[in-house]
Image (cartoon, rainbow, N blue to C red):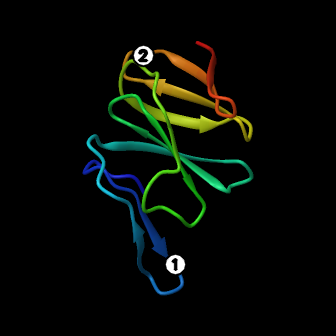
Amino acid sequence: AASGEGTIQSWDLRINKPDIQSEVYASELTCLASVREETKLVVGDGEGTLYLFNEGQYGYHSDQYAGHPDAINHMIAVTDNVLITGCEDGILRAVHLFPHRFVGQ
């Protein structure tokens, strides 16, 4: 789960308790998507940055991509390498993650 306080939190459903919480980020974390055969978690923030976390390692991000001009409000994985992001500026963008580049808007 992403939060407005700038963290992500994983939940252990077997024991119904919080599992791992990330470091606190400067901006709110607004949306999540799973990519790379669900081995990576992509998180968008309120400043236009995408953070990548490895599966099971949610304490601190493994990679980050800046480039969106404003907050990322929503994203959906189209393939294991391509996301569609919806930003505060009202524009939908296609983002290729590996290598990182904007495909179109």
Relative placement, left or right, of 51 versus 48 is right
Quarter assignment of residue 29: top left
Q: Is residue 44 left or right of residue 5?
A: right
The residue nearer to you, when weighing 97 against 87, is 97
Residue 76 on image: x %, y %: 59, 37
Element at label 1: loop
The amino acid type found where label 1 is placed reads: Leu
Give me the residue at 45% from left, 28% from top: 66
Q: Earlier in the sequence, mark 2 or mark 1?
A: 1
Instruction: Quadrant for residue 68, please give it.
Output: top left
Q: Residue at x 39, y 18 (%)?
A: 69
**What residue sits right under mark 2 in the picture?**
90
Q: Which numbered dot is residue 13?
A: 1
Q: Position of residue 7 (x, y in %)?
A: 34, 55
Disc 2 secondary structure class: loop
Identified at 51% across, 78% down, the residue is 13
- Going by the numbered disc 2, the residue's amino acid type is Gly
